[in-house]
Amino acid sequence: MKSYLAIEKLVWSKIETTGDVPKTVGYHSASSFNETLVIFGGSDTKSCFSDITALDTTTNIWVKKKVPSVKCRFGHTAIAVGSWLFVFGGNDGNEFISDLEFLNMGLYFN
């Protein structure tokens, strides 16, 4: 069960979600794209990830998308601008990364 904060009232509420609920990871990024919370990358201390897990906040359904040709990374920064998710820096478990990748979110989510 997940929670959300109603900003107007400053009250936390639990919400029921379904779908491909993400496993616990750290050092990921979370961005907002339209009505979708987008989680990219991260690490579980054993593996580095390059996938996107997203929560449609209108239906409370999680979906997981594989992103071809994107480096796995954790400890990075990401921001959604328009239909693009810009991902900068981080670490792949072997070295620090200083590149910028950008993903067209319209290809993955409507």
Image (cartoon, rainbow, N blue to C red):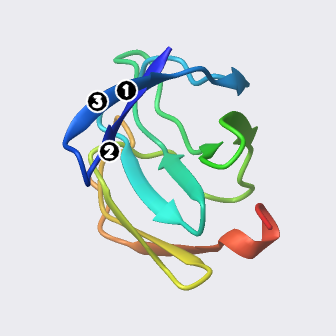
SS at circle 1: strand
The residue drawn where x is 71% and y is 53% is 67
Disc 3 to disc 1, how far (Cα)? 4 Å
Quickly name the residue at label 3.
12
The quadrant holding residue 99 is bottom left
The residue drawn where x is 57% and y is 45% is 50
Crowd around label 2: few <14 · some 14–19 · many ≥20 (10 Å)? few
Quickly name the residue at label 1.
13
Say what amino acid the circle numbered 1 marks: Ser
Q: Tell how many labels.
A: 3
Q: Are marks 2 and 1 in contact (CB under 8 Å)?
A: yes
Comes first in the chain, label 2 or label 1: 2
Q: Position of residue 63 (x, y in %)?
A: 73, 38
From this view, report whether residue 37 is shown above or below residue 17: below
Q: Are marks 2 and 3 in contact (CB under 8 Å)?
A: yes
Q: Is residue 26 visible?
A: no
Q: Nearer the viewer, residue 13 or 23?
A: 13
Quickly name the residue at label 2.
6
Q: Position of residue 22 (x, y in %)?
A: 57, 24
Disc 2 to disc 3, how far (Cα)? 6 Å
Query: The C terminus is located in which quarter?
Result: bottom right
Disc 2 to disc 1, how far (Cα)? 8 Å
